[in-house]
């Protein structure tokens, strides 16, 4: 399966990954993320230059964890900038768009994960397990 991104979505995800990895919410006093989330964001960051080819549901779950982490970081960053500056401040507006583009990707990933899980269930007769999520291959 291919996960498509627009230029704006890729830019927002790269920005969010950088913010997260540089400070993990340090500007807002956030709690440190679980090590798995950090590892997933680190693994996704170098891939954010084009569409992603994902051949298993397990791979998609990893991307989903990373993108969810990035979205939450961007949400916190946006809220912080709106409160610290003003809702119409250029930085606050830019942070809103970064959040919104990443949020759209997160939603699309959720839909794709549901479709992949339904297909696995249709073919195997049972909901996806960790094993079937790892072994069931989806072509591009």
Image (cartoon, rainbow, N blue to C red):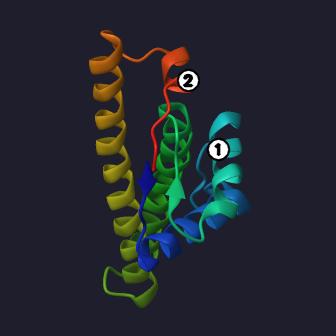
Mark number, residue 133: none
Residue extending farthest bottom: 90
Above or below residue 114? Residue 103 is below
Report the front residue among 54 and 38. Answer: 54
Residue 38 left/right relative to 113: right
Locate residue 2, reporting x and y percent.
Answer: 44, 54
Mark number, residue 135: 2
Locate residue 83: give its quadrant: bottom left
Residue 75 left/right relative to 108: right
Above or below residue 90? Residue 67 is above
Disc 1 secondary structure class: helix
Q: Which residue is mark 1?
A: 40
Locate residue 25, reporting x and y percent.
Answer: 61, 56
Report the front residue among 69 and 131. Answer: 131
Q: What residue appears at the point 29 percent right and 43 percent down from the top-left corner?
A: 111
Marks 1, 2: nearer the viewer: 2
For the residue carrying disc 2, how many other residues have a C-alpha within 10 Å: few (<14), some (14-19), or many (20+)? few
Locate residue 140, reporting x and y percent.
Answer: 45, 50
Q: What residue appears at the point 43 percent right and 67 percent down from the top-left corner?
A: 5
Residue 32 left/right relative to 71: right
Looking at marks 1 and 2 on the same chain, the residue that comes earlier in the sequence is marked by: 1
Disc 1 versus disc 2: distance between alpha carbons? 20 Å
Residue extending farthest front: 139
Disc 2 secondary structure class: helix
Asked whether residue 124 is in view, the answer is yes
């Amino acid at each position: 399966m291919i996960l498509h991104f627009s230029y704006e979505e890729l830019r927002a995800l790269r920005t969010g990954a950088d913010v997260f990895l540089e400070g993990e919410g340090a500007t807002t006093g956030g709690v440190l993320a679980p090590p798995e989330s950090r590892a997933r964001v680190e693994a996704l960051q170098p891939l954010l230059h084009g569409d992603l080819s994902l051949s298993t549901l397990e791979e998609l779950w990893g991307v989903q964890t990373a993108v969810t982490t990035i979205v939450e970081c961007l949400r916190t960053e946006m809220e912080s900038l709106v409160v610290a500056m003003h809702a119409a401040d250029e930085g606050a507006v830019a942070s809103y768009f970064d959040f919104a583009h990443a949020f759209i990707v997160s939603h699309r990933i959720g839909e794709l994960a549901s479709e992949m899980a339904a297909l696995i269930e249709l073919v195997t007769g049972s909901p996806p397990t960790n094993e079937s999520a790892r072994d069931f291959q989806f072509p591009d």
